[in-house]
Image (cartoon, rainbow, N blue to C red):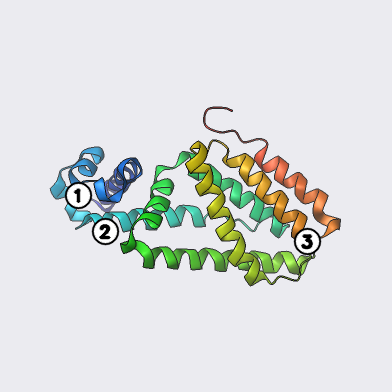
Amino acid sequence: MSIDQQLGRRDAILAAAAREFERVGFASATIAAIARGAGISQGSLHFHFRTKVAIALGVIDEQNVRTFRVVNLADSSPTAALIAATGHFGDLLLTDPVVRAGIRLSLEHGEFAGTTSASYDRWIAGIVDVFRLALASGELRTDLTAEQLGATVVPYFTGVQLVSDVRTGRQDLYAALTTMWHVLLTAIADPAHRARLFAVVASTFDERTAPDGS
């Protein structure tokens, strides 16, 4: 089997595992169901992943790869880049089963606590860097440090999307993120930049719709 074939099979396993973990959770998911979903034998599955825990960690790792890509600092406005990143992350939560399953796994099973903690540390560090740029640019005016902002906004976003999932299956996610940004910008945006940043929020989320078109 070529390297490309091996990678393709590994991707198929992760996709099937993500669907199964999202559907029934880690405890109820079985190797047999994952192999069946990937269209391979259990022996072939074990060639790539020796245990169900290893598969779950693979899903979490792939989820992190996909979500860490959403922060793009090409925008000249650091705060606008953060707003856009939350929009792209929202898209993944609504369309990508690997991302949804990775987040569910991170929160539901103690064996993944170390991996989850490390990924949140990485997320917070990256967002802190963007907040440093936003503060230095004058877009934000606050006595809070970049470190304090990053350590608060990442949990805020996490809570918003989790509550949206529980209450509406994330059908109201974009509306909830719009409100989140209005709260944040009202509190920390420099008045000279506030109207522009509110317009960025509107253009980011108003053009998006929930999966049912509502």
- The reply to whether discs 2 and 1 touch (Cβ–Cβ < 8 Å) is no
The furthest residue to the front = 167
Percent of width and height locating residue 182:
72, 49
Q: Residues within 10 Å of mark 3 (few under 14, many from 20)?
A: many
Percent of width and height locating residue 44:
16, 48
* Residue 70 in sight in this render: no
Q: Residues within 10 Å of mark 1 (few under 14, many from 20)?
A: many
Labels 2 and 1: the sequence-earlier one? 1
Q: Which residue is mark 1?
A: 45
Identify the residue at horizontal 62%, vertical 46% (top origin). 177
Amino acid type of the residue that numbered disc 2 sits on in the rendered structure: Ala
- Where disc 1 sits, the SS reads helix
Amino acid type of the residue that numbered disc 3 sits on in the rendered structure: Glu
Percent of width and height locating residue 152:
61, 63
Q: Which residue is mark 2?
A: 54
Amino acid type of the residue that numbered disc 1 sits on in the rendered structure: Leu
CA distance for labels 2 and 3: 43 Å
User: Which label sits on residue 25?
Assistant: none
The furthest residue to the left = 43
Judged by depth in the image, the label closer to the viewer, 2 or 1, is 2
Identify the residue at horizontal 25%, vertical 41% (top origin). 38
111 w.r.t. 18: above or below:
below
Q: Which residue is mark 3?
A: 139
Image quarter of residue 136: bottom right
